[in-house]
Structures are given as structure tokens and as C-alpha cells.
Image (cartoon, rainbow, N blue to C red):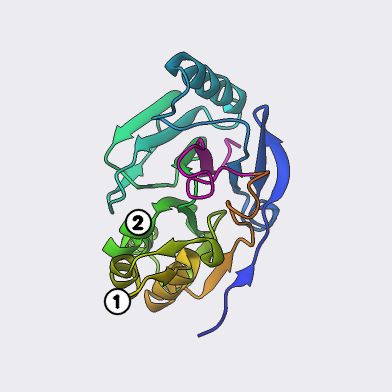
Amino acid sequence: MTEARSARELPTARAGVNAFELSAWAKAFGLVAGITARGADFGLASPEPAVAVLDRWRSFRQGLAPDFPAVVVAHQCHGTAVATHGALPPGWHVLDGVDGHCTNAPGVLLAVTVADCVPVYLAEPRSGWVGLLHAGWRGIAQGIVERGIEILSRLAESSPADLVLHCGVSICGDCYEVGPEVRQAVLGVGGLAGGKLDLRAALEQRARLAGVTELTVSPWCTAHDSQAFYSHRGSRGGDGRMLAYLGRAVA
């Protein structure tokens, strides 16, 4: 199997918040693809006072408004539900029970919250369709990436080979120890002992089996690089949540 190329998200600022973005996707596809950094907790279940989190969301969305009048996010459930969005009225749109989003509408920013799980960015450049998935081990085991690839290919009236995919900032395999039941669920291999699990490598393998050939992986690790990112595992559950986002700005 061909190894995925590394694509490093670079530090920037987005709507007054420190972030890391894929400059390669901006140049090649005209897309904004990135993730917020440590220092701004966007978790919808944050231990911070609700007013503080809502004010942060409101400020972030208002800062995006010239390019992205609408932001869509969801209360995630580690499942495989993927919502499709057309043009949306301005504002912050919050869904329930969804772990992925697709759109071809400029000005609609797709978002998922993460703090070790993998944000999976998808695009079909010819048609303008994009997708963003939240992929933890449960979602990977249930087929969230295959589901996203299938839906985006159908919406774009293309094949998986026409898609580009990026596995974004997440925990690396060296930092992610799991039990045998998790390895069995994700990799289909069991045993009496657990071990290390590379979620991005598992996603790469599944994506290639689904027909995707243009694939990159972030070298950033939420645990190794905890000075820049939140890590649920690295903080033993004490960290906040980052916001991964993807969209095409209003022309």
C-alpha cells in the first residue's frame, strides 16, 4: 500500500483565534481547512461556564461572518451519521447525533469538535463538494470514513478516486494505548493484550480500500504537541476541545 504523504497544518489566526490551517488546500482547492489551537475551548460540554463558551462561539462566528455567514456543528455521538447541507441562513446551526457533514454551498463552514479523535477532511475539487468527519475509534470501527466517502462520491457524482482526503491533527499511535477489544473493533485483530493504535493509519487503510488514492496525514500529535493542542488522553480527561473546520468562503 502506498504510504500517505505528510501535510503539516501551519500556524495562523482565524477570526481572532489561534489556529493551524492547510495552506496546500487553500492554494490548490480554494478551501479553508484547519483546526483551532490550545487556549480556546470550543467543547459543547465544556466544564467552563456556559456563558464563556457561548461568548467564544459567538465571537468566533461573528469574526467568520464575512466569509462564512453560517457555521454548522453537532453534538457528536461517535457514530456514522453524516448530514448534508445546502445553503443555510446566517448563524450558528447545532445538530444532534451527527458525526459528519457535507456541503457544496460557499459560505457554509463545517465544524467538528476534537481533542484526540481525527478530523477527516474530504473534498471533490471538480464539483465543489466537501465533507468533514469526526473519527474516534468507535466511529472508525463502525465505518464513518467509508460512509463519508460513499456519501460525498454520490453527491459529487464521482468516484472515490476523484476525492482528496486529509487525516488531521490527532493523537499519534505512540501515545494511544488501548485494550484488545478496541484493537479488535478497529483493526479486526484481537488477542489477550492491548497495545498501541494508530487511528490515522487505520483511517488511511480504510480510505484506500474504499478507493481513495490522494491522501495526506498530519504529522502533529495532540499529546506530543500539547503546548499547541488539547489532548483528552494526554490530560487524563482535563482538557478542552478544539474546533476543526472546512469550507469554501463566499466569493
| Identity of the residue drawn at 40% across and 31% down | 88
| Identity of the residue drawn at 49% across and 22% down | 53
Question: Is disc 1 surrounded by few (<14), some (14 to 19) or many (20+) residues within 10 Å?
Answer: few
| Identity of the residue drawn at 57% across and 35% down | 250
Image quarter of residue 151: bottom left
Coordinates of residue 164 in the picture (x, y in percent): 52, 65
Q: With 227 as the anchor, is 161 left or right in this view?
A: left
Give the answer, above or below, for where 4 lies relative to 18. below
Whether residue 89 appears in this view of the structure is no
Residue type at mark 2: give it. Answer: Leu
Coordinates of residue 185 in the picture (x, y in percent): 28, 68
| Residue hosting label 1 | 192
Q: Which mark is residue 42?
A: none
Quick one: 211 or 166, which is closer to the camera?
166
Instruction: Give the magenta part as a residue range.
Output: 229-251
> Do the numbered discs 2 and 1 sit on residues whose CB atoms are within 8 Å?
no
- Nearest-to-viewer mark from 2 and 1: 1
Coordinates of residue 43 in the picture (x, y in percent): 45, 32
Work out which residue is located at the far bottom of the displayed protein and give it: 1
Q: With 197 as the anchor, is 172 left or right in this view?
A: right
Q: Secondary structure at mark 2?
A: helix
Question: Is disc 2 surrounded by few (<14), some (14 to 19) or many (20+) residues within 10 Å?
Answer: some
- Give the tally of numbered discs: 2
Q: Which mark is residue 155?
A: 2
| Identity of the residue drawn at 68% across and 58% down | 8
Whether residue 104 appears in this view of the structure is yes
- Tell me which numbered mark, 2 or 1, is placed earlier along the sequence: 2
Residue type at mark 1: give it. Answer: Leu
Give the answer, above or below, for where 238 lies relative to 210. above
Is 156 part of what is drawn in magenta?
no
